[in-house]
Image (cartoon, rainbow, N blue to C red):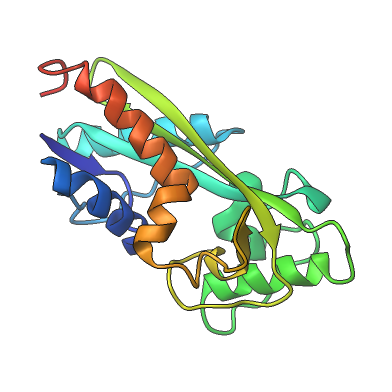
Amino acid sequence: MRILIASTNKGKIEEFRRILEPLGFEVVEPKEKIEVEERGETFLENACLKAKAYFERYGIPTLADDSGLIADAISPYPGIYSSRFYSIDFGGKEEVKTTKDEANIRKLLRLLKGKKERSAKFVVVLFFYGGDRGFFVEGEVRGRISEEPRGEKGFGYDPVFIPEGYDKTFGELTPEEKDRISHRGRAIRKFLEIIKGCEGVFT
């Protein structure tokens, strides 16, 4: 089965590919980014907007991801603003010196500096859309924010997120270790359980 991933984020696409392709799915990467106004107030609303926009452009059953980090001390932030946290007014804007990911992390650590409360969670909603029908699944992993970035694997906030039961950040874990426990890995496995029962519906 061919599945289009509604994203041009190389890190996300690679995570989907690592899990789905060994199971016989063909992961299709968009040839170009579609500018989707993420005007939703929830991860689900934004995932739905992206899935429908990419399906309309490419005509391939589409899996969209909307995800983010929520730090309890400043909840609900970064939240649905995770990818552009550096640019929003909450907590003051952060200058992009190297990458947007680095600016997001720098702002997060600045806002948490000196705080004892460093618990956080990664949340994801996957919305699968095939034209006239679709469904969604959710995934979550709890952990805490480190004092400084550690590790160069992964992407986004991975270098500062330490999952429960570990002393390493996502940025220090191997891809296989991360896939077993990550919010996205958990959501993809839920998606697989549902899609198995939908044979012939979305193809």
In front: 115, or 103?
115
Q: Residue 184, relative to residue 130: is it above or below?
A: below
* Image quadrant where one finds the C terminus: top left
Position of residue 82 relative to residue 183, above or below, is: below
Expressed as whole percent of the image width and height from the top left, the position of residue 39 reads 55, 37
Whether residue 187 sits left or right of residue 62 in the image: it is: right
Residue 50 in sight in this render: no
Indicate left or right for 88 with 115 as reference. left
Instruction: Name the residue furthest bottom.
Output: 97
Please name the residue shown 85% across and 56% down the image.
117
Q: Residue at x 34, y 35 (%)?
A: 189
Left or right of residue 117: residue 177: left
As drawn, 40 above or below 197: below
**Count of marks overlaid on the render:** 0
Residue 177 x %, y %:
41, 59
Q: In the picture, which quadrant includes the N terminus?
A: top left
Could you tell me residue 83's position as x and y percent? Answer: 54, 57
Specify the farthest residue to the front.
Answer: 165
Q: Is residue 36 left or right of residue 24?
A: right
Residue 5 visible in this rendered orientation of the protein: yes
- Kindly identify the residue that appears in the image at 43 percent across and 73 percent down: 153
* Residue 98 on image: x %, y %: 53, 83
Q: Quadrant of residue 57?
A: top left
* Picture quadrant of residue 199: top left
Please give the name of the residue rendered at 32% of the width and 55% of the height, measured from the top-left corner: 15
Which of 40/180 is in front? 180
